[in-house]
Image: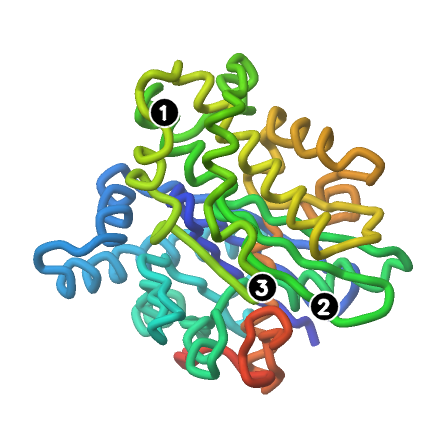
Amino acid sequence: MPELYAGLMSGTSLDGIDAVLIEFQHTPWRPLATHSLAYPAALRAEALALNAAGAAELERAALFANAHAERCAEAVHALLAAARVDATAVSAIGCHGQTVRHRPELGYTVQLANGALLAERTGIRVVCDFRSRDVAAGGQGAPLVPAFHAACFGAAGTHRVVVNLGGIANLTDLPRDGAVRGFDTGPANVLLDLWAEQHLGTRFDRDGAWAAGGRVVAPLLARLLAEPYFTAPPPKSTGRELFNAEWLAQHAPERFAPADVQATLAELTAASVADAIERHCAGAGEVLLCGGGARNTDLVQRLGARLAGRMVADTGAVGLAPEWVEASAFAWLAREALAGRPGNVPEVTGARGPRVLGAIYPA
């Protein structure tokens, strides 16, 4: 019997929903259909606003979760149409939801998703709220993709590192022998996108062209890299709670040319990722990139320069396009949840042990 699962990812970049329909019965795992659905401007603005305290937060969060579920349902229907698959053939939808707060040090993380409404709109079982159980077990609740990275990209006979360049960057260390490890390294696109929106009026710097035209401001880069998070030991995770407009304003006064700040922010991502690999993944010979940042030509070149001597490529080189890795991971996590298998890696998150992740909403 086919093992069909849909995976839905809406990440820190707040750009929308990435959706995959994937069949797990046979390896290698490859999506049967993919779909991206951008957030309307108002919904994106509300997602960003909900990252901070504000009036009527509870109602606004509930309404956002409803709107998010409707968009997710639209994405799932597009997948089914593209693959010519009936909803009854899909075992479950793994829905990450939209993170608006991540405070594991206080014992909580919030991903807005109305799993009940999504199940109603699609007629498919939904698994969501993956991070809370790991946090309840004393973990960071992030990153959760390392278990999928190990299942999908491990056992290659070489020491690999997988780097996800979303809003926040995270890495997974896949040694030939030894435990899978991973953590959030710091910002990937979140500050780059913020600065581009402020100065170009666009959601992102396409291909890193604006950053490529600027010059790195060495004193500014040094000040950014002095952030204690970068040298804190794992397990650790981060998000917009730290790397946000206020953090950037403290470090990047207006006396620097905006293009030079963008170049410096790109170098910050490259430097912090490369340093994390040097510190914690000694001996890795391959670095595979995924996430939206893997399509940023300037950022990839900067990473390649700092990781000279290692093979640097995106995950498409081993068969799974970089923009669909995270959505595929949450389809896989839904499959693990229904099978009663743990989805976290305690060595990554710091949880007290393996845990089955996710809340299940029947079809």
- Neighbourhood count class around disc 3 (C-alpha, 10 Å): few under 14, some 14–19, many 20 upward: some
Q: Residue at x 42, y 44 (%)?
A: 13
Q: Nearer the viewer, mark 1 or mark 2?
A: 2
Q: Amino acid at mark 3?
A: Pro
- Neighbourhood count class around disc 2 (C-alpha, 10 Å): few under 14, some 14–19, many 20 upward: many
The residue labelled by disc 2 is: 180
Q: Is 322 or 211 nearer to us in this picture?
A: 211
* Secondary structure type for disc 1: loop
Q: Nearer the viewer, mark 3 or mark 2?
A: 3
Q: Is residue 344 left or right of residue 25?
A: left
The residue labelled by disc 1 is: 202
The residue labelled by disc 3 is: 234
Which circle's residue, 1 or 2, is located before the other in the chain? 2
Q: Is residue 280 left or right of residue 184?
A: right
Q: Is 101 or 122 nearer to us in this picture?
A: 101
**In the image, residue 93 lies at what x, y percent?**
49, 68
| Picture quadrant where residue 310 is located | top right
* Secondary structure type for disc 3: loop
**In the image, residue 193 lies at what x, y percent?**
41, 33
Q: Which mark is residue 306?
A: none
* Secondary structure type for disc 2: loop
> Split into 4 quadrants, where in the image is the N terminus?
bottom right
Q: Residue at x 39, y 79 (%)?
A: 361
Which circle's residue, 3 or 2, is located before the other in the chain? 2
Asked if residue 70 shows in the view, the reply is yes
Q: Is 259 or 34 nearer to us in this picture?
A: 259
Q: Residue at x 33, y 20 (%)?
A: 199
**In the image, residue 326 lies at what x, y percent?**
57, 55
- Neighbourhood count class around disc 1 (C-alpha, 10 Å): few under 14, some 14–19, many 20 upward: few
User: Measured along the vertical axis of the image, is residue 20 above or below residue 268?
Assistant: below
**In the image, residue 266 lies at what x, y percent?**
53, 30
